[in-house]
Image: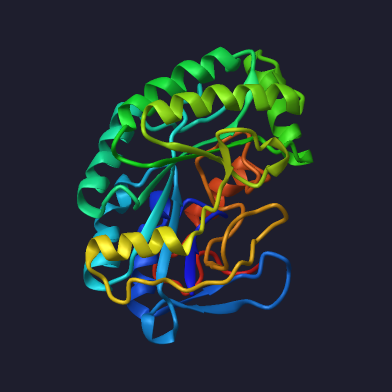
Amino acid sequence: MIVSASYRTDIPAYYGEWFINRLAAGYCMVANPYGGRPYRVPLRREEGVEAFVFWTRDPEPFIDCLRVVAREHGFPFVVQYTIIPYPEALDREVTDPERAAACVHLLRDEYGPRAMVWRYDPIVFSSLTPPEWHLERFETLASSLEGATDEVVVSFAQVYRKTERNLDAAAREHGFTWEDPPDDAKRRFLLELSSTASGHGMRLSICAQPRLLAQGVEPASCINPGRLGDVARHLGIEPATVRARRKPHREDCGCWESRDIGAYHTCPHGCTYCYAVNDRERAAHRFAAHDPEGEFLLPPG
């Protein structure tokens, strides 16, 4: 079993103490995000756990935790690291790109180039971040990350009702406009990103948006037992084969089966475009109420 931590919230940036406590306990409880009964997720190899995938915008607070995962517990892992330097009007907390690149190189040196995946997503087009803004920053980041990772995952913002509401509110507050371009324009844009990525030794893949696939743009498999197995072999972890079946967690997703241990509406980053948070202030209050000693990241109710 692969454990995902977590596409629902940023566990490495904000909930590392809770995660390490639960890893020591060998399990955690998860509130069902769809209203069903809470459920238990094992976190030890004896109960079938083979690897972890971490999703974050800032892995620095989690570096010592990663050593516990790999060195003390013998689990391979992959870090899906979002690095995209949006202005504050779109994203309240942005890691300095130079610091982010240094962190990726540090983790590459310790765990190998397959342990880190750069995510440049979601892509939001606005009067503050037009296509040329993205192309310039993508080139700079790709250059700084060359040799530290072999893949960059992209996607365009999914404009759900809550996303539209939050973007509109931010646009009114900060005086910008935003748009969701047609698919043909997105494909042309992806070709430019793909050329840049290739020039820096990376493959470009797109997450859960297969209609936008084009030459040089591959479907992403963010939870991938093959990549995890490569990390295990690099670290000398046995067994070096991670088993999973194809079971995407949403339509058009290329991931393999996993169990996610996060909770929606608990990430205080404050990204305007986030699909996992309805209300940024509510998320901040929920984070403040979090108990790192508890079984749940945040109890139901």
Up-down relation of residue 57 to residue 169 (above or below)? below
Could you tell me residue 16's position as x and y percent? Answer: 36, 58
Q: What's the residue at 39%, 62% (across, down)? A: 228
Front residue of 297 and 125: 125
Could you tell me residue 244's position as x and y percent? Answer: 52, 72
Front residue of 42 and 208: 208
In the picture, residue 11 is in which quadrant?
bottom left
Residue most toward the front?
A: 215
Could you tell me residue 230's position as x and y percent? Answer: 34, 60
Could you tell me residue 224's position as x and y percent? Answer: 49, 59
Residue 180 makes an appearance in the image: no
Q: What's the residue at 42%, 64% (across, down)? A: 52
Up-down relation of residue 120 to residue 37 (above or below)? above
Front residue of 74 and 201: 201
Q: What's the residue at 21%, 52% (across, down)? A: 110
Q: What's the residue at 66%, 14% (across, down)? A: 176
Residue most toward the bottom?
A: 46
